[in-house]
Amino acid sequence: MAKSPEAFRTISEAAEELDVPQHVLRFWETKFSFIRPMKRAGGRRFYRPQDLAVLKGVRRLLHDEGYTIKGVQKLHKEQGVRRLLAIAEVDLGVTMVETTSLGPAGQDRLWRVLEALEAAKAQLDEGLGDSRDQG
């Protein structure tokens, strides 16, 4: 039975969906601070749908568009995760048709909220990682 689109994916499932080896996903985690899958006991990774969307954007830039790792890092720094998601052309449950009724200002606010949530999640993950390292 196939998993629903909202289900978390293991690293093997994510690698298969992205058509890259697992070690590439692990490597990307070291190069891109915005790639932060959930980690369970024993370090097992679980990728959320949004993680996969960002990874699809990264993959497309690196493999299809000819970007370097530094180029993707610079793009993310300048334009944020919004650009990576747009590149991936994925539906995160809110389609662009649905967001057009918000108008440009509303769309921009929605993306800023998404970026703020991702930054907060990264801080929480970092804090949890520090407490696990000490415990």
Image: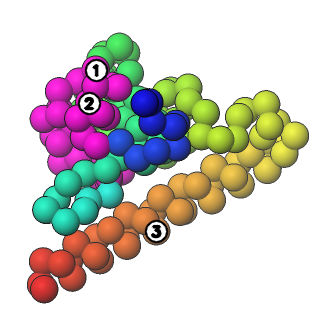
Residue 134 falls in image quadrant: bottom left
For mark 1, give the secondary structure.
loop
The prevailing secondary structure element of the residues shown in magenta is helix
Q: Which residue is mark 3?
A: 120
- Residue type at mark 1: give it: Asp
For mark 3, give the secondary structure.
helix
User: Residue at the location (32% across, 57% down)?
Assistant: 38
User: Residue at the location (17% across, 34% down)?
Assistant: 22
Whether tag 3 and tag 1 are in contact, CB under 8 A, the answer is no
Q: Which residue is mark 1?
A: 19
Q: Which residues are magenta?
A: 10-37
Given residues 64 and 121, the one toward you in this image is 121
Please state if 7 lies on the left or on the right of 67 as rendered: right
Q: Is residue 78 in view?
A: no
Given residues 9 and 56, the one toward you in this image is 9
- Residue type at mark 3: give it: Ala
Q: Is residue 88 in view?
A: yes
Q: Which residue is mark 2?
A: 15
Q: Is tag 3's residue or tag 1's residue first in the polypeptide sequence?
A: 1
